[in-house]
Structure formats: C-alpha cells, structure tokens
Image (tube, coloured by chain):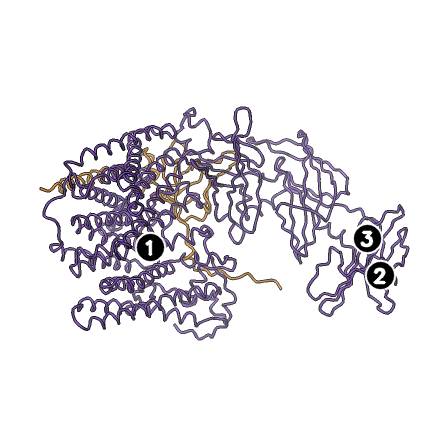
Amino acid sequence: MKKIYFIAIAMIAVAILIFSTAAEDMSTYSTFADAARSGKKVKVVGQLAKDKEMYYNPEKDPNYFSFYVNDAAGVSHKVVLLAEKPQDFELSEQIVVTGKMKKEAFVATDILMKCPSKYKDEEISIKKEQKG
Amino acid sequence: MENAISYIGEHLWPGRIGHAGILLGFVAALLSALAYFFATQRRDKPEAAQWTKIGRWAFAAHSLGILSVIGMLFYVMTRQYYEYQYVQAHVSDDLPFKYIFAAFWEGQEGSFLLWMFWHVVLGLVLVFKAGKWESPVMSMLALIQVFIGSMILGIYVGWGDDPLKLGSNPTLLLRQVMDAPIFNQVDYVSKLSGNGLNPLLQNYWMTIHPPTLFLGFASTSIPFCFAIAGLWLRKHTEWLQPALPWALFSGAILGTGILMGGAWAYEALSFGGYWAWDPVENMSLVPWLTLIAGIHTTLIAKSTGYSVKSSYAFYLLTFVLIVYSTFLTRSGVLGDTSVHAFTEMGLESQLILFLGFFTLLSLVMFFMRYKGVPAPPKEERITSREFWMFIGTLVLFFSAIIITGSTSLPVYNKIMQFFDPTFEGRVITEPEPHYNKYQLWIAVFIGLLTASAQLLRYKGVNWESYWPKFLRHAGVAVLLALGMSFLTTRWIEVKDIRHLTMLFAGWFAIAANTDYLITFIKGNLKLAGSTFSHIGFGLMLVGILASGLNKRVISSNPFIMDGLIEGADEQSLRNNILLFKNAPMQMGGYEVTYTRDTLDKFSRTYTVNYKKKDPQGQVLEEFELHPNILYDKSFSKVAASNPSTKRYLDRDVFTHIASLPQVEMDMEFRRKREDSLNYRRFDLFEGQEISFLDTVPIRDRDTSVLKRYTVQVESVSRETRHPDYKPEKGDFTVGARLRVQREGDDTVYLAEPMLVLRKDMLVSYPSQINEISAKVRLTDAIFTQLFVPESELGYKEYELTQGDSVRVGDLVVRFAGFNKQPDNRDYQPEKDDIAVSAVLDVRDAAGKTYEAQPVYLIRGSQPFNLKAEVEELGLHARFMSINPEKESASISLALTGKKRYTVPFEIATNSLRSDYIVLEAIEFPGINLFWLGSLLMMVGLAVGMWNRMRGSHA
C-alpha cells in the first residue's frame, strides 16, 4: 500500500468530518416563530411591511434601526438592526435578516436586501420635456 | 414582427455590422475548431498543412468578427445611440467618458465579449508561438470560443410559441427587445435617454478589475488546452514544458485580478474589509487554488517524472471550475446568497451545456488515456521534496473542495428541490466564521509545507549526508519563527491557540524561505520565483491575522471593549457614531471632528479631522480624511458612499459615512419637510430689529416651552456667498446678513441667506442655523425693490464732449473720456464686440468722488447700451450714442437718491438639524503586510514565468 493512499484516506476522512460538522453552520430559512422557539441565531426571509413604522433617528442612536418584516408564514414582527438604515431600504423586494429573537424584537446582526434590478425594469426613461 | 413605421433618427448600420460580426465570430470559431481538429487528427498526412492553414484563417476571421462587435458596441456607446438596447441600459448623457469601458463590461454580454477578446489575443499569440502544439491547442481554444460566442448569438432555435433563445445579442435595437407605446412615434429616438452606469460602479476599479480578472479567466484556458493536447497526442511529458509558463502567467494575472477585487471592496466600497467569503469571490479563488496546485505538480513532473496525472487533472479541473464559476455567477442560482452576482438572463441551460460539455470532455480524455500516462514505478521517498510538495497540492485541492462545497449549497438546494419540491433549502448562517475555521488549518499546513519542502531536495538525493544540514536550517527557521511570533504578539493581540499556530506557520514560511533564498540559491533572482511567492504567502498570513483579528472599530463606545456594559456582545456590533459639525468627539484614542463639507456636481465630500493628543493636550499627529457620498443623477437620493482611508506603514484608518440626516439623503423628504416648516414673514430695513415668541420642543419629552427670538437685519448686498452656491456667468445675486438670537442662548448666530436669478430661474439658498434649529430664507419680493423699471427713473439726456461737466441735483458729473476696455460688472466681453464705455467722474456735495462707466456696445451689428449705477448715490447712467463728428457722447442720467432697501425674509424655528454625519471608522493594523505578501506572491509567479519562458527557448 502506498503512503499516498493513507494520506488520501486520511484527507477523505477529514473531509467527511468537516462536512458533517459543517451542518451546524447551516440552517434553513426560519420564520419568526421558529426563531422564538429555538432561541438560536437564524436567518429569516421575508418582505418589508411597508405599512408599519420604520424608525431611524441617528441623533438619538446611530446604531438603532427598527422596522417590521412579514415572514414566510405571513407573520409580521419587529426587527431591530444594530446599524444604520441601509440605502434604498424602502425599495427592497425581499429581505434576509440574520439574528436572534430577543424579548421585544428580532435583533439582526446582518441584513441582505434584494432590490429590483434595473434590467428587469421594462420602463424606458424618457427625457423630460424641455421648456422652450 | 415587422414594423410598418419608418423611424427617424435611427442609426442602423452599426447594428448590422455588429450582428454580422457576431455571426462571423461564431461560425468562424466553429470552422477553426474543426479545421484544427482535422489538422491534429491527420497530423502525419500531407493535408495537415492545408487544414492548419484553414484553421488559422478561420481564427483570423473569428478575431475580426469579435473585434468588430466590440468596436461597434464602443462606437454606439460613445455616440450615445440610445436606440440600441445595450447603450440605453448602460450609458447616459451624464456618464463621464472615462467610464465608457466600465459601462461596456457592466452587462453580461459585454463581459462575455471581454472574455472572448482575451481569448482572441492569447490565441493569436499561440498561432505564432505554439509551434507543433498549434493545431490541438487552437482546436480546443476555438471550441471554447464557440461556446462563449453562443452566449451573444441571440438566435431562436426551434419552432412554435416558445422557441429556445440562444444567447443574448447586444447589438439589438430597443424596439426589437421590448414593446412599448413609445415605438408608435416615428421620432422616438430623440425622446430616449439612457439608464447609465450604476453609481456604485463609477469607479476606476471598475475600469481595471474586470479586464484583469477576465484575462486571468481566459489564460486558464491555455494550460487546459495544452493538457487536452497532451492527452490527445499521448505526449504526456512534452506538453508540460510549454504549458508551465502559461500556467504561471495565468496564476499571476488571475491572482492579481482577485486581489484587485479585494482592494476594491476594501478601498472604494464600504464593506469594511477585503474578503467576505462571498460566493463570487470564492468561485474566482477556487480555480486559482487548483491552478497553483497544477503548477506545483508540473514542477514535480518536470524534475522527477511523478505527478503527471495530477498535472493533467489540476489544469483540466481549473478550467472546468472557471466555467462552473461563470455558471454560478451568471445563472442566477446564487440568488440571495451573494451581494454581487449578475442578474439572470435566461442563459442557464446554455451555461449548463457549456459546463457539462467541458466536464465530460475532460473526464473522457483523462480516463481514456489514464493507463498510458507514465509514472515512475517506485513511490516518492518520504524525505524527498516532491513528496511534500505533492501533499501540499493535495491540501490546496482539499481547500478548493471545501470552499466549492459550501459555496455550492444553493446548487444543491436547487437539485434537491427538483426531485422533492417540498425540500427546504439550507443556507450558511454566518459565512465568514464558517469558512475561516476550516481555511485557517489549510493556511497552517501550506505555511509549514512551503517552508519544509523548500529545504528538501528532489528525489531525496544524498539524504544520508544531507539530513544534518536540513535539520540545522529547519531548526534555525523554527527558532526564528518562534522569536518573530513572540514579537508579533507584543504588537497585535493573538491569544487563541489556532491563531498562534497560524502566526507561527506564517513566520516559519518566511524564515525558511528567506534562509533558502540567501544560503541555497545565493540570491540568484532567476531561481527566486518560488521563494518570493512563499515568503509572500507567509507575510500574507501574518497580515490576515493582524488586520482581521485586531481590526478595531474606532467609532464605537470606548467602554464596550472592556466589557463594562452589559450585553457587550450585541453592543460590539454598534459601529457607528454621530458627529456634529465642528464638535470634536473622543473615540478610539483620537479626537475626531467633522469640519467641512463641499458639494461638487453630484458628490458631497466631507472633511473629517483626526487628532491624536498626549495627556498634556499636545497634538502628536493629525490628519484629515475625505469620505464622500454620491447622489443619483436626479439628485433625489444618495446612490453611493465612498470611504476614505489614511494609510500608515503599520495600519490603516478607514472611514466611511454610514448615514446622514434624512434631509440630506432624501430630497423628496426634504421638500416635504421644507413645506411643513412654519415660516414667519418679516420685512425689515437694514439695522432694524424684531422679536417674536415661538415654541421649542424639549428633547426626548412631549412638551415644549415658549422662547423669544430676536432677529436683526445687518446688511443687504449683491456681493454675497453661500456654501452651496457655485457662481455662473450672468447670475444676478442678492444676499443679506441677519443676526439671530434665541432666549437663553448667549450666542448670536449669523444667517446669510441668498437669492440667485439665473436666466428665468429663481434659486433660493436658505441659511440653516443648526444650533437653534432655525432656517432663514429671503423672499423674491426683494427683487421688486432692486428692479425699478427704467421708464420710471426719469432720465435726462446730455450731449457731452471730453472734459464737460453737468450738474445733477447736488452732484457734479464730469465726462472724463472714452474707455475701450469697459469696466462694468454687467459687461462680459465676447468675440467681435465693439464696445466702449464713457468714464464718468461723479462728485457729491461733500466732495467725495465716484466713478461710473456706462457701456455702448455693438454686438452682431446690433447696438446696445448697458447702464452703470452708483448705488451709494442712487445715480443711474446710460451711454445712448456716439457722435463721431463732434467727438461727443450722448449720456442719459437719472438721480433717484440712495434707496433704503427693506429685506423681506422668512424664518422658521422648527427646522431639523442637518449638520451631522453618522460615521464608521475602523483601524486595520498590519494590513500592508497582507497587500505586500499577496503582491509578492504574484511577483514570484511572474519571476517564475519569465524564467521558464527563457528556459523554453534555450
């Protein structure tokens, strides 16, 4: 038996070990109900509840932005992001927040927004009529 | 669908040329691949030369086709022919010319063209330089071009209602890709405007990063083609020689391209780091890792005859991974896991075909020839360099597998959902720690192996006599590494055993390779490529540890770090701090002040001053940073925020504007807010004072108090300034200085609002007093006072020759003579003007003298006259005509007396504060070690390539 085979087998073993432990780093997209149940850090996917309050007042706290998200189950919940309000936040079609459920709100440490792409936009911008 | 309308203003010929170029490029690539295929298959027959000739000409035609598409696209883009869909999507009137390249490869089609362009360039080099390898290598390269070319074909295959669309053609007209009512107008072209380039991408990195990266992508094709050629011709050892310089070239360029991406993210985008394990980043790194593995196995194979099979495997895999990376980033499969993937364009099935074809081809070729590939019968000795080098390549391969595995999670989800629609997709909750925890050990192994393998000899020759020397050098390197690691922990904080191990591995690689450079190859730079790269790798590891582990958020509450605040875990995420203008703030050992902001076109640049002081208050160091924000072209929203970084040798101070007052970010909100302000209107003479009561809300409470405000008009003037006002020719301006005071506040604040009349437009520049939330603006009524109609002034005309004086009221006006260079603030000279002014000396009753120069002017054969006014006296003068015979001038004079202007103004006391920024500031220690190390790696690869290229000709 060649030495190299031992090394290859060892590496494969480590690879299997890694991929089995890596499952811990993974999660499915949760709902707020799941997040409350597990108490762990999860990702929640949903849409911005545009009818509810968005609050960001940097004069009071530049690291506090709160808004409401409707999750996949249709439940609306308050989300607090410990950072500034992201640009073009209102335009987002879909929001993925990573964080934990706390007493009063879902505290997000990371946020990813999907904004409508300009390529899909079927509108054509037309020059504004120039005044003579 | 045929359009019955004949349109006005369309430029159709570039589109026709471009379309012809696409078809020519595609067909000629196919022909070239076939011709070179036959040239290879029948290489021993006389017709081979004929086939090669056809292959060459076909490739030349292909090159012509691709270059003409590129040329045509650039032409229509620079001409702003918006009737073209690609132009409309990526160009706009206000796009600076320097970003035309960036706009070109912003779109998928443009970036495919860029990729093909580099294949064309590399292919032409190969036609001349590849010699006997030309036919098989070019056959493969042309075949790759066929596949990429199909991505921009834009033809429909199949029949019926839903034919398969093959590729997306960038030369189509807008009206060919969409239906809109505007196309019912014959002159629709003149009504179009472009979308332009995303402001986030309006950056010089967008000009240099994609071409470098795509040259890197394209150059991985060459070792791939050589590998296929080697298998095809069964020349299993000969292909390594010509493939190696190309592989080294590719390693250097692809590596540089990846680094540029990191530098862009760090320097120009507000990601706050250079690497985030984003899928797009990962999938450009992975092929680089396998390519580097391939370079190492090639070196083993050339020196010892081992690892030929692995060399094949790595080069084949590298290209397949490049295609896989293309598939991931362009098919839309990454979805919401990546920040910067392209949007989907319906190319998924074509990309899968591209990937499937080359994967299958590689597998078939590899396993068909597997048995015939030579390998020495004996195993590598454990004391040989090749053994440990090979282990190193396995570690790299291993790294590639686990990165690819995690990155491919969305693909796995898609496949599972295909079989089981109820399957719930999985995601990595936190990518950065996930990747870091595995790659850390990869880095440790590679660091240790680059050091120890370098000191070993190929085939382990004379190990019996060599081992004491090996141990001596290895021992010295270990001691040096331990010493340096210890010193490093004095500078940066490294506590975790895993990080300490990585630190040691980095220094061990540096020490052993430096030793090798000095004592073994005696500083011979020609042989130094590998040591450079390995030292670079070691430095990079130290740099990653220093900048990543000790990255310090300056802009945060200083007590958080010490764990004095409960819930510090959460608090430590709070990276932003609020800075009021001119109010210094202590943070992270600096005194930080936001001092200034200036608006230039669409970008507002903020000046942030950093001071470091000793306990006595002496300034030890001071610097200014200039982060800026870019508004979108309609000036309604902030489109991008660009950071600014102070670079020291041992650390960087990174600063970026995280947020601004809403009135500065959102012009819609600003307008609404402005409309809701409760303005009080006053009309005062200069020097007059007024006071009024108004409610002031108490912060953080729901009540308010009544306070008295006092306003005094200090002066009114036409010479005036405002921070946002940029003077333009022909502007008519008026401004006032007002002194505003609020009860209970000792400071008297100065407000300087102004009004500008520009052509027919009246622009108001209000003055904001942030400290008391007051806003003052002038009303346009002030102009009715400034403009008394000329007919109401009561002019009297005088005929004057030089030296004549007249009496007007109690003034004496003397005509001092003509002036051919008129001095009059309303007169702007133009070419071909005939202009002359009458110099009038005016003396008042008190004996004080003034001068006025009314102008007589012939412009474009039309006579004009421009009045002059002595405002202090209220004297108006016009130069009506010249009488050349008598050498006299006809002057009209009117005296209205000095006017007392009133200043009509409005003041609101509930205006929002707009004088602050929300700042994020991070200190990255030792980040230059990372850049230096990674650059040194690339330099090493380039030195290796240069050396091998000379070697191959010798």
Whole-percent x, y for residue B94 in the image: 52, 58
Image height of B109 relative to B924, above or below: below
Whole-percent x, y for residue B19 in the image: 37, 69
Instruction: Check the rendered structure and report the hue given to chain B.
Output: purple
Distance CA(mark 3)–CA(mark 1): 73 Å
Q: Secondary structure at mark 1?
A: helix
- To which residue does mark 3 refer? B851
Residue B498 shows in the view: yes
Residue type at numbered disc 3: Glu
Q: Quadrant of residue B575?
A: top left
Which labelled disc corresponds to residue B891? 2
Residue type at numbered disc 2: Ile
Which labelled disc corresponds to residue B116? none
- Chain to which the residue tagged by mark 3 belongs: B
Instruction: Check the rendered structure and report the hue given to chain A.
Output: orange
Sequence-wise, which precedes: disc 2 or disc 1? 1
Residue type at numbered disc 1: Arg
Image height of B853 relative to B737, above or below: below
Which quadrant, please, contains the N terminus of chain B?
bottom left
In front here: B869 or A3? A3
Q: Secondary structure at mark 2?
A: strand
